[in-house]
Image (cartoon, rainbow, N blue to C red):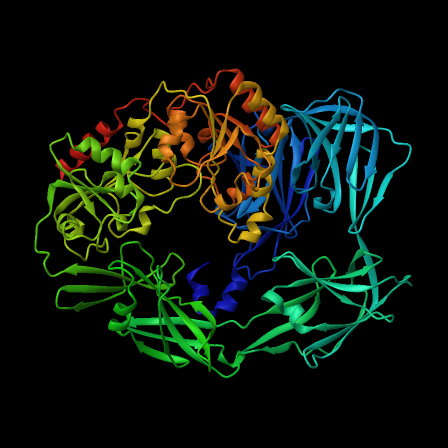
Amino acid sequence: MSRFTNYFSKHVRERFTKEIELIEINRAKGDFIFTYKVLPFINLRVISKYTASVTIDNLEIDLPCEFKDDIITVRLSETYFKNRPDNFTIQLFSFGQPMRIKTRKNKNRTQYIVNEKLYNIKVKKDVHISKRYMSLDFKNENVEVNDVILQKDGIMIKLERDVDEETSLFLSYPHKFIELPTKLINKNTLKVTGLENLTYGVSTFYLAQKENVYTMNGYLEEKKELFTDFYAYTIDTMPALMLNVKEHIVKLRALYVSEITNNIVTLKIKPEQEILLEHPSISIYNSKLDTTKKIALSDDLQAEIPIEDLIDGFTNKKINFINSNIIYQIDIRSAYIEDEMLGRFRNENEYLTTHFYRRKDNYLGFRVSRPRIKRRITDIKNFKLQGFIKGRNSFHEVENVIIFEDRHSQEMVVNTIDDKFNYEIDAQEIINIMSRDKTIIDLYIGIRNKEGKIVARAKLPYKNSNYKKDNFYDLKIIKQKDRDVYLLITTTPFNNLKIETFVVPKSVDTNVERDRNIWLLGERIDTAQENGYQLFKYLQDQPVEAYYVIDEESKDYKKIMHEENVLVFGSKKHHEISLKAGVLLCTHDFENILPYKPSKEFFNYNETYKVFLQHGVLGRKPAEYHKKYYDDPFDIFIVSSDSEKYDVVVNTMGYEEDEVKVTGLARFDRLPMNHKGKDILLMPTWRDWINTDERFLNSEYYYRYKNLLENERLHDILEKYNVNINFYPHYRAQPFFNKELINTSEHIRFITLGEKSVQELLIDHALLITDYSSVSFDFTMMNKPVVYYHFDEDRFFNRGILRPVNETFLGDIAETEELLVSYIEASIKNNFETNVDDISEIIKYRDHNNCERIYEAVISEKNKL
């Protein structure tokens, strides 16, 4: 956008922005054809020029691109799939400038089989094509189906060929490819269970035997049909074995909605066709809470619905019609609608927006939304916050408040404010709620009723935020008798305000010079298990004065408290050493090892030499250690390979080549190279989109690992070879994974948090099963095999992946449960020998000299200063 457009309002400026939409994907004559539409905008150029390219393995290649009448056509030849690349990126340019692409949701097929591999097409700024189910080969061969029996408890499929326990079945939809729960009935028959969990729509069956996947075909004399309470199922073999799942639908001629009277809404429906009624009712389904409430319908199909049932949980609802215990979706696209609901309902102190509506699928729904609080801080000066709040008129008998809440204790200070305010923060009030010397106070705008209850609150954004991890916008120092309390106004990565605090005892001399021979190390404030602690142990034999800092409340502190030069976080000794230390080394941000705010404004912090030891190997999920996030960034960034250095830290995170040192991680020095063990460690990582117990129990994550633990073939294998699986779930999942809740084998054991350190677990086991956890690098370093379970790769890496999957996931990758069990058995049979020879892409040095290299790098670089 040119400077010329800056003279216009934001609304007008948006009309100058070119938007391009991917409207169609076709496959014809050996090409993929991508059709884009240029959406209407104010064009300042007389002509338009578009070009396109595809990037494969860092190689950019021009693609044929045509433009006519606002339609852009780009062709991608299938010859580019010849070598089965993992990823493609198709980028569109206008006069050399990259265009941002959007897409029509669910309009285009996004799954394609090319050169025996399954590829998924996703639009995220550009068009991304990525390989799915990497270990599977999709053969151009059919498996003959002799018969299909469709029953309420599953689908029985009788086959021409023999099958076994390793055989699995899949369904292919236009937008996804899913594994089906499958049981072996006999050598020619498989049974699919869990029909109620299948997605409605048309899908195609595939059969997998180990790494080979086949289409399924045959001849059925007639279609197989099944009618259940929720769906109608149809199976046909034209052109292949296919399943069509349809919802039961009732189409309405008319819909009547009354106003809310005495907290009751009257809903009346008139179907297009006559229905033989048998105990009719309306159901209100809350998908987020997975709850359903039923309301009886009268003979003329009228229901009296309590408004509390509709607004429960303040979530949108799906409204269904139930008759004879059959659940119908209510199609209202052709209905005459008479709606007297005003759309505004007072619930206690809030005015909710409420109304029935037509969902995107044309079915009847109910929408409820709580009032939003518009708020913003526009200026910060002299510890005063200037800003505004809007939205109080959407509440009843309330007042505006500003809230200060300690992040650790949740203790609060709450004060009233006007719609427009210039609020001076009371420093003593903040000090009074500090749960510890160094803490974080989050700021909120809230709405409080007459009884003093906070009925709504929202975080407080700052208009002029310039987020850095080591900066601040305002500072107040409160000098007390025995200490100075520092209060700093900062922002979160999402530009919301917070106050950071720290305390300096009067007994500590702050007027000291930095000593480059004093080194302060640590990890997270409460751990002594990995790179920081291992390097600290090494440095005790070197001519430097090294100290390790840790919270005295942590479990790890009890293990190392008697060692020399171990500091308690926040102690007087810690303060003194932190002010003298000329070299800082940490696996995470220096907040974890300093009792004060890491900022060049304090105590000659800018004179320290800063070494980022890292927690693991980068290359999978994005990490927030980019150079742009610091005013005073790391002087040395430790990595384990040349690929990690250049592909990630230099090219992506913005560090200079000489600032990144390929040394290996300090904790690698503790890893034995010839200690095999005999058992298997199962250690999955967490999913950050699972944030409630209900969501966890309904998640694919829980379903997949519960099924694996209960897999009978796996039980037989463990029994046969007398091998155990030790399952170490994430701490948030531990309450749900135990012997009492999981029907599993005596050869599967559950390890509780804190029972052993992670490194001890890795050393003691012969095979690691994980999904995306970086602990796999340690296992690979020890020359031991890793099997990866990738059933949700697309969602896990939704924010992007820093390096291709094949570069950092070294070992077998299983996308299905049965394939995973087969890989486990194969590894046991192979005496747990690794099938990975070259690990240089992730770990350059396979030795025990990592600490030495880190030490030499720091000594060499700091001596140059």
Q: Using the image, determine if residue 401 lies above or below residue 720.
A: below
Q: Using the image, determine if residue 191 lies above or below residue 229.
A: above
Q: Residue at x 68, y 36 (%)?
A: 181
Q: Residue at x 38, y 56 (%)?
A: 493
- The reply, left or right, for residue 635 in relation to residue 197 is left
The spot of residue 9 in percent (x, y) is 47, 70
* Picture quadrant where residue 523 is located: top left
* Picture quadrant where residue 361 is located: bottom right
The spot of residue 134 in percent (x, y) is 57, 29
Q: Pick whichever, 305 or 471, lies toward us.
A: 305
The spot of residue 35 in percent (x, y) is 65, 45
- The reply, left or right, for residue 736 in relation to residue 246 is left
Q: Pick whichever, 531 or 703, lies toward us.
A: 703
The spot of residue 87 in percent (x, y) is 53, 34
Q: Pick whichever, 39 or 471, lies toward us.
A: 471
Residue 469 visible somewhere in the drawing: yes
* Picture quadrant where residue 715 is located: top right
Question: Quarter holding the C terminus?
Answer: top left
Q: Residue at x 68, y 30 (%)?
A: 30
Q: Pick whichever, 757 or 342, lies toward us.
A: 757
Residue 382 visible somewhere in the drawing: no
How many numbered circles does the render carry? 0
Q: Using the image, determine if residue 503 lies above or below residue 112.
A: below
